[in-house]
Amino acid sequence: MKKKVEIIAEVKTQSPFGWKSDKTWEEIFEVAQEIGDIISIHTDERWGGSFNLLKQARSLTEKPILAKGIHQTDALVEQAISCGADFVLVVGRIPKIYQKKCFIEPLTLKELQKIPKGFRAVWNSRDLSSGELKKETFEEARASFSGWLCQASNIKTIADIKEGASAVLVGTHLFEFAESLLNR
């Protein structure tokens, strides 16, 4: 890592693509609290999350919290903020409320190019419809968007951080990533 990259440490116990952690939510939260600049808490049950877990996390940390989920409606963004989130991940759309608190995850490069300056964008290397890798790369995303851009998914160690990433969102491989931070 040549420059300081924000670490968004994700508390995730499962995914809808077949992955399941052998650690408890509490064990994952402890590591996220230790290494994360921001702690990501899932609100979507498919990833082992809920709004109740978001409230619980808020009671356990003073660090900023990102409510991670699809958040298909502005009502869900409102709910995440009212449960204690500092930021809310919104996938495939730009909400009408709390725009400065939203991280926008486009589904395609074309959507990424439409995100206005000043927004935080998240480029997920995983296709959320299939769980497979997207064909478009982080490098292509970085070339398409000059603002704050978070690299997400498939990050195992600090060696996986791409040039130009403003932040990384690390979930499935959180423990391995934490280990690589200790050994840098």
Image: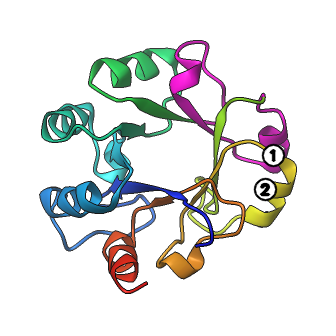
| Residue at screen point 29% across, 45% down | 49
In the displayed structure, 53 sits above or below 117; it is below
- Residue under label 2, please give it: 142
Give 166 or 30, whichever is nearer the viewer.
166
Q: Which residues are magenta?
A: 91-116
Within 10 Å of disc 2 (Cα), the crowding (few <14, some 14-19, many 20+) is: many
Q: CA distance from mark 2 to mark 1?
A: 5 Å
Residue 92 appears in the rendering: no
> Is 177 colored magenta in this rendering?
no
Location of residue 152 in the rendering, given as x and y in whole percent from the top left corner: 56, 59
Residue 181 appears in the rendering: yes
Total labels drawn: 2
Location of residue 161 in the rendering, given as x and y in whole percent from the top left corner: 59, 71
| Residue at screen point 37% across, 57% down | 9
Q: Amino acid at mark 1?
A: Phe
Location of residue 133 in the rendering, given as x and y in whole percent from the top left corner: 65, 69
Marking on residue 5: none
Direction from residue 70 to residue 180 in the image, left or right: left
Q: Amino acid at mark 2?
A: Arg
In the displayed structure, 52 sits above or below 20; it is above
- Residue under label 1, please give it: 145
| Residue at screen point 56% across, 63% down | 131
Direction from residue 169 to residue 60 in the image, left or right: left
Q: Quadrant of the C terminus?
A: bottom left
- Do labels 2 and 1 touch, CB within 8 Å? yes
Q: Residue furthest front?
A: 3
| Residue at screen point 70% across, 46% down | 107
Give residue 113's quadrant in the image. Answer: top right
Within 10 Å of disc 1 (Cα), the crowding (few <14, some 14-19, many 20+) is: some
